[in-house]
Image: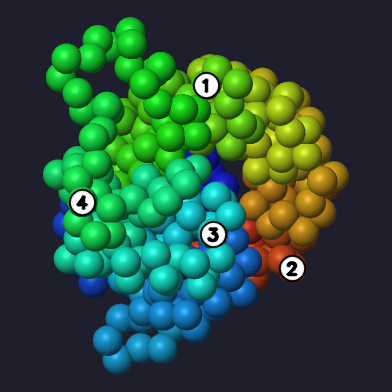
Amino acid sequence: MCKRLRLSQHQERCLVGEPCGERTFSVQEVAEHCGLPRSVIRQWIGRGLLEPVRGSKDRFGFQAVGLARTLCALRRAGWSPARIKARWEQARRVVADPAAALSGLVASVGAGHVTVRAPDGRLLEPSGQLLFDFATGSQTSKADLPRLRSTQDWFAIGVEAEAAGRVQDAVRAYEYALPGSSAETHFNLGNCYYEQKRRKEAAAQFLAAIQRNSTYAEAWNNLGIVRGELGDRRGAVQALEHALSLVPHYADAHYNLAEALSSIGELGRARRHWSAYLRFDPNSRWAEQARRRLRSPRG
């Protein structure tokens, strides 16, 4: 996920397991991280899918942010909060750790029945029955591996790996899913390439996502970010403007467009979009940066 998620370096280190102290996150920050409205996060809280840190009603630790990433993946696959809760309860019968049980449910995406991938890689039914899993078969050649699973299965494996922070595994799974794949597959692969600093390849995947779904505002936003980092500043402006033509209230696209316009000297237009960002997202950790930009005569 490109700057749409806008994690600080501190947050990124913590999400991959490095020491991070006692940092907690608000509902707004969790929503930003997921790219979702706060109402969705509050719905998850109401269902008991996310729990605040002890002694707080609306602050969340890093484990909750990790859970939210998996909840996002399941939501994108069409799972309702009620379905997630019921399946999570089933998964915890065979995987004791709640976070691992939820992450393991991503293996069910696109499948006809509930399966859970355990932390050791085994694929299980909620009854505990071990399922035969080609993905880890040592006798299978690398060339044959993509054909042993459906596009939907590889996508689900990629989502699971990405949610767990295993970016290289996610890349491999998404690449296996590419023939005839969805816009979401290309978008996720683009985000993983971006994390690996493979900017040109990320841009190609965001374009592929747009070719499959021309109204994919997040893909237009991320394409704009990557184009800017590759030096195509006017191309960045065009992509971000298109994102906003699709979703006028897309706060992050307003912020990113303001930055892109500032980089080419169009400060008057940039100010309008920093102001728009503050209207839509006044309490984020990026809001003060937008305010500083507006106070500065040079943007």
The residue at the far bottom in this view is 55
Of pointers 1 and 3, the one earlier in the residue sequence: 3
Q: Which residue is mark 4?
A: 129
| Residue displayed at 85% across by 45% down | 245
How many angstroms separate mark 1 from mark 4 (CA)? 31 Å
The amino acid beneath tag 2 is Arg
Label 3 sits on a secondary structure element that is loop
Per the image, the residue denoted by label 3 is: 79
Q: Are marks 3 and 4 in contact (CB under 8 Å)?
A: no
In this view, the mark in front (1 or 4): 4
**Structural crowding at the residue carrying mark 4, measured as other residues with C-alpha within 10 Å and reported as few (<14), some (14–19) or many (≥20):** few
Which badge, 4 or 2, comes first in the chain's sequence?
4
3 vs 2, front mark = 3
Q: Quadrant of residue 120?
A: top left
Task: Tell me how far mark 1 sits from mark 3, CA to CA.
Answer: 23 Å
Read off the residue under disc 2: 279
